[in-house]
Amino acid sequence: MSLSHVGKVKSYWATYRLILVAILLFASAVYLHSLTQKPKVYVSKQESAVNFKIDFIKFFSLGNKRLLSDLIWVQTLMESDQDHYKQKDLNNWMYLRFASIAELDPKFYHNYLYGGQFLSIIKDDLPGAGIIFEKGLKLYPNDYDLNYYAGLMYYFELGDADKGLKHLEKILHHPRTPNFFPSIVNKLKLETGEDLESIYQLVRHNYEEAEDPILKQKLGNDLYAIKAEIDLKCLNNQKGGCDYRDQNGKAYILKNGTYYSAKSFTLYRIKKRGDKSPLLKSIINTIK
């Protein structure tokens, strides 16, 4: 065997050894990586959502404002989150989307109805919800749903009784108004409408009317909590005419002389925050 041939063999073996070592090192790195607990990184939708200024959107819509508003609407529904928005600075990403849609397609009714409900019930963004409702009511002043949900929000959430009753009284004689509604409005006028029985009727009506699954789930949880509190107070105070089954049809549990619900729940409480935000007031006044 010539010296040159021996040198080539040694060179090949050296190369194979390097490849083998590289493979072993790579496999070791992958194994160690799988054993290492990696920190979870959470980026909220508020931080990652993209919103453009309405003037920019209008300029590049090229006359297709309605098509663009539909695209924004669908994308917003697909990306919607349930995180509460605590700031009252009108910078909630979902509010900005609904406001943009209102500018592009002012007659898009569902944007006001579902946008207002989602902001007030799910996102807890009351200033944003108020503005979206008011924009809708400017175009549809006698609409049943807009007056109903805006009225409840103003009265119970924002603590503005006058504004809330103004919207609720507008639909007292509407064909869709439930039979129990006039008596509840009268109680609200006398400021005695916070009994749980009346609230249960209102929330049940909202639940039956809701189409969005997220809204329906939230209202369903509220219904369970309200009914459970009513029933358990009745049962544990040994009153007559009590209901022994919860909202889901399951029997309440009797343990050591006390009734409990099969499912845990958080007591439902009306917030009545009395938010007199100058920002909200000034913007609503300009809309009106």
Image (cartoon, helix red, strand yellow):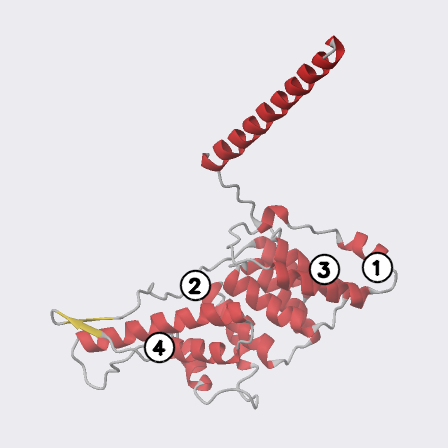
> Which residue has dot 3 on it?
100
Image quarter of residue 262: bottom left
Q: Is residue 208 visible?
A: yes
Q: How far apart are marks 2 and 1 (CA)?
A: 41 Å
Q: Which residue is drawn at 26% across and 82% down?
A: 243
SS class of the residue under badge 2?
A: loop
Please indicate whether residue 49 sits to the left or right of residue 40 in the image.
right
Disc marking residue 61? 1
SS class of the residue under badge 3?
A: helix
Which of disc 3 and disc 1 is earlier in sequence?
1
Q: Residue at x 47, y 77 (%)?
A: 207
Q: Distance between the residues labelled 1 and 3?
A: 12 Å
Please indicate whether residue 283 sits to the left or right of residue 167 in the image.
right
Which of disc 4 and disc 2 is earlier in sequence?
4
Amino acid found under the numbered disc labelled 1: Ser
Going by the picture, which residue comes out furthest to the front? 1
> Which residue has dot 4 on it?
248
Going by the picture, which residue comes out furthest to the top? 3
SS class of the residue under badge 4?
A: loop
How dense is the environment of label 4, judged by Cα within 10 Å: few (below 14), some, or many (20 and up)?
few
Amino acid found under the numbered disc labelled 3: Ser
Which of disc 1 and disc 2 is earlier in sequence?
1
Q: Which residue is drawn at 79% across and 67% down?
A: 67
> Which residue has dot 2 on it?
272
Going by the picture, which residue comes out furthest to the left? 256
Amino acid found under the numbered disc labelled 4: Asn
Which of disc 3 and disc 2 is earlier in sequence?
3
How dense is the environment of label 2, judged by Cα within 10 Å: few (below 14), some, or many (20 and up)?
some
Q: How far apart are marks 2 and 4 (CA)?
A: 28 Å
Q: Are marks 4 and 3 in contact (CB under 8 Å)?
A: no
x%, y% of residue 14?
64, 17
